[in-house]
């Protein structure tokens, strides 16, 4: 320190360099330096001690080892304590010693205060105390045991804007008149009662009406007399506004991270942004997004050009109903260059405006209603921030203050940019998800049947519900496929996952099922071929795809109205429910089978007889839902809904959905297919056994003619005789007995010839002089459609003819009223 003159500093208790005794000791305990203050303390001149062991200065040399362990060899960087040292004149001097290690492995610095010849008077210490209190840069006040103000220092008077004489004798709550003052008084009361210090943080306006709100940390300390009783409380306040505001900004960013982006809905995300910012950042906030945001076209990158067309997506205010807003949510408006919205988007950066700025006045001239709103609510500061994500401009967030007296600052700009950037990513994610979901839904709808066929064997109705708006389109599908012999195939399936990949896979599987159904494969064989296809699709997708392996479930059923039997097979799909005419409901014990795509495991089919007017319910697992209920409970709800049908089959579909699905939407796609069973009685079916004798061709024609006459189908006799003649002749000539001829009369006329040969027929082009080879060509020309299918014992060749208008049909018209 600089040495002061004896007439000034020394007179008033000042210090000079010799007032500190200072020495240094090496790591091995050797004294390396010794100053004048150390000489004054112990009387040893520097040449006598420097270079000698420091332990020799100890009053008791026998304790040298202990001193070395505690000081010289300690691993600490600082040590303090009282050490008994030996003065040059031989007396023992207790020295309060402070030792610092100056480097990790370096020497020690030892310091202590040296004795002074002149001691300051007691009044000098009192003066220092008074000066420290009065001139402290920390606001301080003293309250007595009645919590009445007795004294304030100059800084507290400056902070409060009140002189001590004006407030002496008042309580703190009377001085401040704020609710926070009562909190401070409660802390003061607790200090007086317990004698323990307390610390309270508060945020208030300490001065007059023009003062800014500040954050303070108020520490209350008890003032005790010599008897130990607390007679007063000293309050010391510390301005922590910067720390408080920084903490509030962090809390706001944390709230924004938690609250913004909870859904994949664009407008909901915009509203979350507005809600987070009011009232912590602004008194009013509006979120305007580009009108093109929800359209399929690409958005522009970089700043925009004026004027800007925006849609009001969200708003929030301190006042209920957001009366500051001129544009309601959902409305599209055009903003000129003078508006904060357009100016911000054209500049591509945040902008702060005062309400008195010329551009605001120009905007108010163009939009008088906005000018009236600014004046009415006293809006004085406006901040506009672009909403941008991944280099794309999505919209603008506008913040306004009218109740908060402080204008927006650059710190507010940084905070608003951080929040809007996070929100922009969420908005852009929602936009991209919405586009992908709409694309997937459009693809899915194009692949699902627009209208279901109504085959005579069953009456069908269906419902399809896509997953909620945030799950993405799935791969659920259903189909009704008319088969030969008046039979019908019912199929329902579910592809794992959501999105375009699932929808595209669903379309390929549905096409494959229809193709395999056309060749009349049994349900278990059809699923085996479908399993191979899914494995092939998974191989095409590749393990590196984010969508993962391709997988699906499927249920395939074939119903024959002649035999009244239904054959079913499942690939990891829920079992169908059967509601019988008597009101009972059962879930058919279809062997579950592995999901499609597993490979290497067999599928097993089951057969059951279905009564007339029974309802078969096929569905995907989305119907049972992922709610807080188990599968058994879902089955009970489905059985109850099917046991109490609502008139039409379509009404029953709606009743099932109302019963099993909550009102707030579905978590997974739902496909539901109901089929009411119809049967063909013996009066509409004729069957003959045909011996392998060419003479029976004519007999077969006569049998068919007689039966068609009984059915009133005389106009169909000629064509049917030709078809029967060709099919029976081929069976007798090329096939293996037994041979059977069957006619089925429903909405069309079906002719079937079954034999025991597994060789499928092939239509070929006969040459001019060939005597044969024209039979199947003739059948094809005379029939609406024809084909062959494999049976357990051979094959069946069939032909279907459309009945002339006016001829009676076998079954009544079946119309599903949905």
Image (cartoon, rainbow, N blue to C red):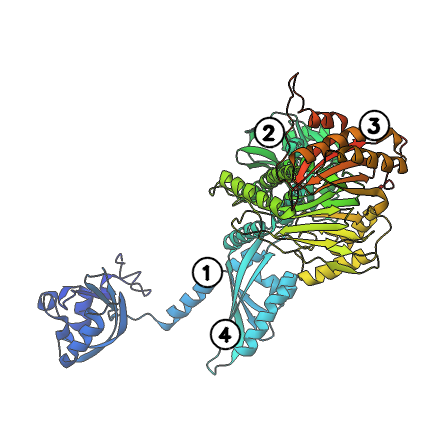
Please give the label number shown on residue 77: none
Helix, strand or loop under label 3: helix
Mark 3 lies on residue: 718
Q: Nearer the viewer, residue 585 or 122?
A: 585
In the rendered image, residue 238, in percent from the top left (x then y), is placed at: 50, 59
How far apart, in angstroms, are the residues tagged by discs 2 and 3?
Answer: 65 Å
**Residue position marked by numbered label 4 in the rendering:** 223
Q: Is residue 48 above or below residue 366?
A: below
- Cα–Cα gap, marks 4 and 2: 72 Å
Q: Can you say which quadrant of the picture contains the C terminus?
A: top right
The residue pinned by badge 1 equals 136
Residue 130 in view of the camera: yes
Q: Is residue 521 left or right of residue 662?
A: left
Give the mark nearest the N terminus, 4 or 2: 4
- Near-viewer residue (817 or 348): 817
Q: In the structure shown, which secondary structural element does the residue marked by tag 2 occupy?
A: loop
Of callouts 2 and 3, the N-terminal one: 2
The answer to whether the residues at label 3 and label 4 have Cβ atoms under 8 Å apart is no
Mark toward the start of the polypeptide (1 vs 4): 1
N-terminal of the pair, mark 1 or mark 3, is: 1
In the rendered image, which residue does mark 2 sit on? 298
Height in image: 57 above or below 711?
below
How far apart marks 2 and 1 lie (CA) works out to: 64 Å
Which secondary structure, mark 4? strand
């Amino acid at each position: 320190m600089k040495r002061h003159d004896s007439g000034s500093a020394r007179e008033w208790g000042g210090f000079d360099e010799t007032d500190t005794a200072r020495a240094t000791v090496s790591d091995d305990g050797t004294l390396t330096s010794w100053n004048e203050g150390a000489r004054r303390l112990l009387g040893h001149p520097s040449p006598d001690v420097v270079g000698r062991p420091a332990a020799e200065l100890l009053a008791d040399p026998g304790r040298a080892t202990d001193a070395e362990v505690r000081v010289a060899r300690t691993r600490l960087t600082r040590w303090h304590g009282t050490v008994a040292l030996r003065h040059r004149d031989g007396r023992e001097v207790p020295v309060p010693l402070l030792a610092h290690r100056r480097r990790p492995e370096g020497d020690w610095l030892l310091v202590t205060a040296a004795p002074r010849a002149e001691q300051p008077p007691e009044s000098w210490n009192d003066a220092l105390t008074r000066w420290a209190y009065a001139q402290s840069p920390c606001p301080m006040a003293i309250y007595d045991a009645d919590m009445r103000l007795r004294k304030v220092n100059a800084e507290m008077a400056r902070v409060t804007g009140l002189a001590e004489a004006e407030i002496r004798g008042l309580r703190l709550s009377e001085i401040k008149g704020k609710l926070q003052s009562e909190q401070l008084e409660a802390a003061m009361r607790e200090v007086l009662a317990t004698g323990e210090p307390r610390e309270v943080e508060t945020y208030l306006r300490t001065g007059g009406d023009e003062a800014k709100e500040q954050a303070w940390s108020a520490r209350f300390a008890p003032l005790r007399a010599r008897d130990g009783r607390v007679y007063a409380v000293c309050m010391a306040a510390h301005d922590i506004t910067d720390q408080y505001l920084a903490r509030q900004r962090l809390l706001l960013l944390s709230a924004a991270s938690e609250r913004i982006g909870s859904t994949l809905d664009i407008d909901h995300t915009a509203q979350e942004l507005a809600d987070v910012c009011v009232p912590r950042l602004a008194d009013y906030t509006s979120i305007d997004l580009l009108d093109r945001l929800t359209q399929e076209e690409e958005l522009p990158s970089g700043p925009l050009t004026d004027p800007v067309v925006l849609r009001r997506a969200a708003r929030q205010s301190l006042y209920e109903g957001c009366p500051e807003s001129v544009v309601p949510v959902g409305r599209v408006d055009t903003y000129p260059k003078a508006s904060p919205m357009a100016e911000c988007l054209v500049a591509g950066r945040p902008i702060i405006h005062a309400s008195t700025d010329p551009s605001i006045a120009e905007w108010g001239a163009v939009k008088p209603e906005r000018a009236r709103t600014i004046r009415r609510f006293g809006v004085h500061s406006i901040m506009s921030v672009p909403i941008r994500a991944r280099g794309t401009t999505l919209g603008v967030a506008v913040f306004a203050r009218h109740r908060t007296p402080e204008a927006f600052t650059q710190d507010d700009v940084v905070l608003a940019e951080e929040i809007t950037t996070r929100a922009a990513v969420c908005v852009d994610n929602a936009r991209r998800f919405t586009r992908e979901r709409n694309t997937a839904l459009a693809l899915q709808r194009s692949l699902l049947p627009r209208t279901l066929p109504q085959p005579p064997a069953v009456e069908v109705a269906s419902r399809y519900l896509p997953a909620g708006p945030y799950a993405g389109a799935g791969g659920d599908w259903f189909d009704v496929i008319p088969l030969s012999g008046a039979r019908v195939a019912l199929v329902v399936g579910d592809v794992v996952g959501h999105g375009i990949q699932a929808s595209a896979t669903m379309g390929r599987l549905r096409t494959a099922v229809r193709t395999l159904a056309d060749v009349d494969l049994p349900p278990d064989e059809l699923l085996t071929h479908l399993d191979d296809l899914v494995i092939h699709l998974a191989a095409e997708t590749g393990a590196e795809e984010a969508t993962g392996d391709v997988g699906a479930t499927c249920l395939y059923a074939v119903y024959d109205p002649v035999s009244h039997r239904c054959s079913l097979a499942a690939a990891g799909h829920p079992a169908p429910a059967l509601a019988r005419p008597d009101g009972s409901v059962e879930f058919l014990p279809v062997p579950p089978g592995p999901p499609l795509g597993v490979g290497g495991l067999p599928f097993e089919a089951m057969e059951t007889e279905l009564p007339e007017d029974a309802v078969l319910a096929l569905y995907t697992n989305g119907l049972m839902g992922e709610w807080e209920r188990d599968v058994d409970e879902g089955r009970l709800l489905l059985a109850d809904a099917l046991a109490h049908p609502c008139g039409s089959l379509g009404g029953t579909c709606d009743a099932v959905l109302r019963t099993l699905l909550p009102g707030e939407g579905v978590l997974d796609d739902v496909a539901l297919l109901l089929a009411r069973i119809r049967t063909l009685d013996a009066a509409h079916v004729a069957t003959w056994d045909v011996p392998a004798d060419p003479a029976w061709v004519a007999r077969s024609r006569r049998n068919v003619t007689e039966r068609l006459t009984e059915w009133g189908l005389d106009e169909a006799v000629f064509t049917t005789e030709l078809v029967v003649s060709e099919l029976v002749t081929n069976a007798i000539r090329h096939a293996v007995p037994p041979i059977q001829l069957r006619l089925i009369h429903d909405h069309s006329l079906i002719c079937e010839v079954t034999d025991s040969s597994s060789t499928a027929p092939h239509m070929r082009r006969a040459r001019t002089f060939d005597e044969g080879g024209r039979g199947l060509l003739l059948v094809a020309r005379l029939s609406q459609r024809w084909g062959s299918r494999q049976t357990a014992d051979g094959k069946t060749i069939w032909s279907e003819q459309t009945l002339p208008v006016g001829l009676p049909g076998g079954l009544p018209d079946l119309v599903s009223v949905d």
